[in-house]
Image (cartoon, rainbow, N blue to C red):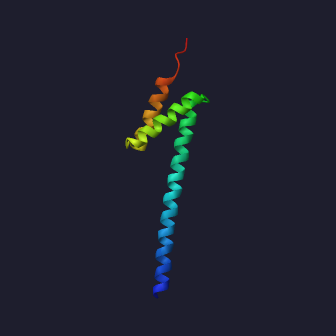
Amino acid sequence: MDSLSIFIIVVSVILAVAFKWVLFRKIQHWMDQDLIKQLAGGNQELLSRLHDHHQQLKADGVKRSERHDRLHQFARNSEPERN
């Protein structure tokens, strides 16, 4: 194989890996946003607080699975008392 063929293969592999990584990150973001919207249940105030809490957890370096657990806990604690 000549150097041009090797270059094309290397560039193709790098672009494929980069595309997969970007797509994976986008899907994770969409899943996080869907979870937050589901937990808010149409309550705009809770939605805003969940977004803020999620951003804070992300900034603190909390792992994604733990963030989901903490978001569930935060939403449960934020629910109004039912009589």
Q: Is residue 39 visible?
A: no
* Frontmost residue, 37 versus 44: 44
x, y percent for residue 50:
50, 33
x, y percent for residue 34:
57, 40
Tell which residue pokes out farthest to the top in this image.
Answer: 83
* Frontmost residue, 47 versus 32: 47
Q: Quadrant of residue 64?
A: top left
The C terminus sits in image quarter: top right
Tell which residue pokes out farthest to the right in this image.
Answer: 42
Q: Is residue 77 above or below residue 62?
A: above
Which residue: 47% across, 80% down? 7
Q: Quadrant of residue 61?
A: top left
x, y percent for residue 6:
46, 81
Q: Is residue 3 above or below residue 53?
A: below
Which residue: 54% across, 52% down? 26
Number of disc labels: 0
x, y percent for residue 41:
59, 30
Q: Is residue 42 visible?
A: yes
Which residue: 50% across, 53% down? 25
Q: Is residue 51 above or below residue 17?
A: above
Tell which residue pokes out farthest to the bottom in this image.
Answer: 2
Q: Is residue 47 above or below residue 3?
A: above
* Frontmost residue, 57 versus 73: 57
